[in-house]
Amino acid sequence: MTVRQLQDEIIKLKKQTDTCILAHSYMSEEICEIADFTGDSYALAVKAKATTNKNVIMCGVRFMAEMVKMLNPEKKVILSNPAAGCPMAEQMDKEMILQIKEKYPDYAVVAYVNTTAQLKTIADVCVTSSSAVKICRAIPQKNILFIPDINLGTYVKERVPEKNFKLLSGGCPTHAKINEKEVLAAKSAHPNALFLVHPECRPEVVKHADYVGSTTGIMDFAAKSDAKEFIIGTENAIIQHLQFAHPEKRFYALSKDLVCNNMKATTLSDVYHCLTGDGGEVIDMEESVRLSAVKCIEEMIKYGG
Ligand code: 13P
Ligand code: SF4
């Protein structure tokens, strides 16, 4: 079967089974083409809340599928590849944060969405990379315990000086491994290119950026900009999407190492097998966990929209 034939089968099956396919922008081009909606974590959460289909397939990582389930308890939500986790989401657990909270009782727990459902049960509000600054400014609390990403936390802290932040040392292993030397090398190889970067990168990388934002933010910036060349400082999948969307522009990877193996785990064939009922993982969540965890997602959507 060719890629095109497999895509046609998927399109037919999703209609027959009343299934909506959501894909994070880090998915491959061939998956994004058959998705009903693609976007960053925030956009996917909003879309998940609005979808009317009976079934949802989430092409992304586990915490994203959990978020869809929290917002749609009555729907069958399938994670397209059960091995696709997010290492950052596993770095901190509920017990660890409860212990820290004892030392900082008057701090609001602001959790990046890249956290488990269990951890979300003790968060006051969730944020994504595109909504974090806005939400930290908007919430009534002055003191914020920001978990788990220290790089996103530092980025937000610098932009919200009126609040007190306590940061912990978690983060995305893919974005955090990029250093300033690589930025300088990419800039000297492409002196006319604008540098667009994700806030999960280290501050020494982010400080050189012409634009800092989520995956959707970076893609929108590149689409609207009059510039012709861009260095992309996030997962390399979006370079191909940008290249297809804007063939007249040039996009360069900040580093060949900006690859998330978890986001790369999902294949078109995984999506096909979810639809035929012999693949993926149906997300199951205890109702008590769902009810406590969904509150911080609802708060995020309330503040972030
Ligand atoms: P955004 O989708 O918010 O840009 O986050 C990127 C990411 O690393 C998701 O895991
Ligand atoms: Fe997690 Fe980083 Fe991969 Fe996103 S890119 S899923 S934060 S490991």
Image: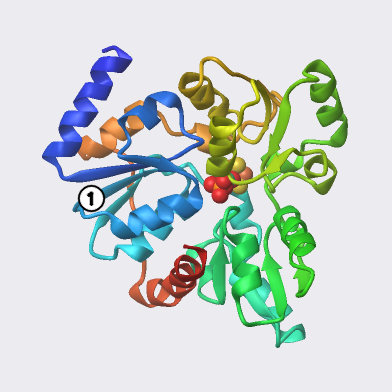
- At 59% from the left and 56% from the top, the residue drawn is 89
- Location of residue 71 in the rendering, given as x and y in whole percent from the top left corner: 35, 64
- Residue 278 can be seen, yes or no: no
The amino acid type found where label 1 is placed reads: Asn
- At 23% from the left and 37% from the top, the residue drawn is 275
Query: Is residue 281 or residue 260 the one in the foreground?
Result: 260
- At 79% from the left and 46% from the top, the residue drawn is 202
Q: Where on the picture, by quarter, is residue 15?
A: top left
Residue position marked by numbered label 1 in the rendering: 55
- Residue 129 can be seen, yes or no: yes
- Location of residue 64 in the rendering, given as x and y in whole percent from the top left corner: 45, 52
- Location of residue 67 in the rendering, given as x and y in whole percent from the top left corner: 42, 59
- Location of residue 216 in the rendering, given as x and y in whole percent from the top left corner: 52, 42
Q: Residues within 10 Å of mark 1 (few under 14, many from 20)?
A: many
Q: Is mark 1 within 8 Å of ligand 1?
A: no
Q: Quadrant of the N terminus?
A: top left
Horizontal side of residue 13 vs 153, given as left or right: left
Q: Secondary structure at mark 1?
A: strand
- At 44% from the left and 75% from the top, the residue drawn is 295
Q: Is residue 5 above or below residue 27?
A: above
Q: Residue furthest top?
A: 2
Q: Where on the picture, by quarter, is residue 39?
A: top left
